[in-house]
Image (spheres, helix red, strand yellow):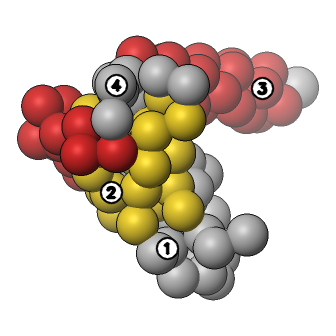
Amino acid sequence: MFRNALLIALLGLASCAEARMERAVEAAATCDVDADCALVVAKCPYGCFVAVNVAEVDRIERRLDRAPSTCDYDCIEALGVFCDEGTCQVDYGE
């Protein structure tokens, strides 16, 4: 029973950390033009790549480096980044 409670608590902490990372990336993804955006290599569970403002690359890379990778998956190639209505997006050529 204690083991189950501990596992549930750890999973809750992991999901909180994931939510904080997602909010940080979202806040770092503001742009006016395509040149404002840069591609950052991420890791599971945050996606293969994230698009952020060029001024935020180092900060987001440091956060991702410190974050645990809790899974593994194959990634498709990113073609670049673009600014879409004020938010940097990854271009997967879709």
**Badge 1 or badge 2: first in the primary sequence:** 2
Query: Mark on residue 39?
Result: 2
Q: Is residue 60 left or right of residue 52?
A: left
Residue at 41% in and 56% down: 81
Across and down, in percent, residue 11 comes to 69, 31
Residue at 19% in and 31% down: 56
Instruction: Kindly report which numbered mark, 3 or 2, lies closer to the viewer in this rendering.
Output: 2
Across and down, in percent, residue 48 comes to 51, 64
Determine whether the residue tagged by mark 3 lies in a helix, strand or loop. helix
Is mark 2 in CB contact (under 8 Å) with mark 4? no
Q: Nearer the viewer, residue 39 or 20?
A: 39
**Badge 1 or badge 4: first in the primary sequence:** 4
Instruction: Kindly report which numbered mark, 3 or 4, lies closer to the viewer in this rendering.
Output: 4
How many C-alpha atoms fall within 10 Å of the one at disc 3: few (<14), some, or many (≥20)?
few
**Badge 2 or badge 4: first in the primary sequence:** 4
Q: Is residue 81 visible?
A: yes
Spatial CA distance of label 1 from label 3 is 35 Å
Q: Nearer the viewer, residue 90 or 10?
A: 90
Spatial CA distance of label 3 from label 2 is 34 Å
Query: Mark on residue 93?
Result: none
Q: Is residue 63 visible?
A: no
Q: Specify the quadrant of the image occupied by residue 31.
A: top left
Q: Which residue is mark 3?
A: 8
Looking at the figure, which quarter contains the N terminus?
top right
Residue at 40% in and 17% down: 27
**Badge 3 or badge 4: first in the primary sequence:** 3
Kind of residue indicated by mark 4: Asp
Q: Which residue is mark 4?
A: 32
Query: Mark on residue 78?
Result: 1
